[in-house]
Amino acid sequence: MNKKQNKWLWLLVLLGIAAYFHFAEQPKSKPEQGAAPPKTAVVEQARTPRQNAAQAAAKRGATDGAELIAQAFAEQRSDVQVSGSGKVHRTLPDDTQGSRHQRFIMKLSNGQTVLVAHNIDLAPRIPRLQRGDTVGFSGEYEYNAQGGVIHWTHRDPAGRHADGWLEHNGQRYQ
């Protein structure tokens, strides 16, 4: 594949990711008037037995989330709540289409890399983020062939999703 074709392929992949985040983080429907938002426990019950087993295994063994992410990647699973830390491998330009996201590639302790897409319309941007910085995270893992994406690293203003966050230099961004 020549460089021009490779560039177009990456552009299409990035546009697909941007479109996914734009539509995935939109509320599916408006809540009924006066209805209480579902609690996190309800969200946990909605997960499949396989996801619950994987999360239990992660709590037993992996303190940095790398094991759970590696397992989700191997099984091509998405919608997996993860937390841990990693090192910034590369910073990327912000995604400014739809909801704006600060983006960077994070390398986990097992060597796997994941894209982190941090919604800066709902949470503060991490200032002066650079290669080699350690970043703690809590968010949702989504599978893709490049290693996956961690998003929902912010509070859910609708209260229907588990809150996430990023930590850098002792400061939490959510």
Image: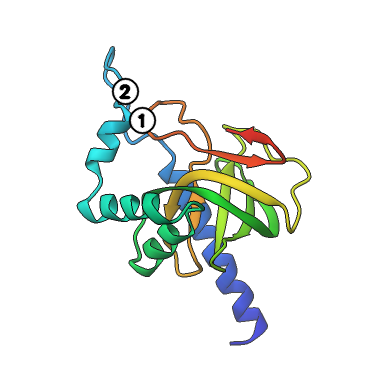
Q: Which residue is mark 1?
A: 160
Q: Is residue 97 visible?
A: no
What kind of residue is marked 1? Arg
Question: Where does the image place residue 41, in percent across and percent down from the top left?
Answer: 28, 32
Residue occupying the point 63% across, 86% down: 2
Give how far across and how far down residue 38 sits, in percent.
Answer: 29, 26
Of 91 and 41, the residue lying toward us: 41
Label for residue 37? 2
- Number of numbered tags placed on the structure image: 2
Closer to us: 88 or 27 = 88
User: Going by the picture, which residue comes out furthest to the top?
Assistant: 34
Image quarter where the N terminus lies is bottom right
Establish if 29 lies above or below 68: above
Specify how the rendered protein is coloured: rainbow
The residue depicted at 38 percent of the width and 49 percent of the height is: 59
Helix, strand or loop under label 2: loop
Binning the other alpha carbons within 10 Å of mark 1 as few (below 14), some (14 to 19) or many (20 upward) gives some
Q: Earlier in the sequence, mark 1 or mark 2?
A: 2
Q: Residue at x 59, y 72 (%)?
A: 8
In the rendered image, residue 17, in percent from the top left (x then y), is placed at 50, 57
CA separation in Å, label 1 and label 2: 6 Å
Q: Is residue 140 left or right of residue 12?
A: left
- Residue 52 numbered mark, or none: none
Q: Residue at x 61, y 58 (%)?
A: 106
Q: Is residue 54 visible to the viewer in this orientation of the structure?
A: yes
Left or right: where 102 falls relative to 149: right
From this view, report whether residue 144 is shown above or below residue 59. below
Say if mark 1 contacts mark 2, CB within 8 Å: yes
Q: Label 2 amino acid?
A: Pro
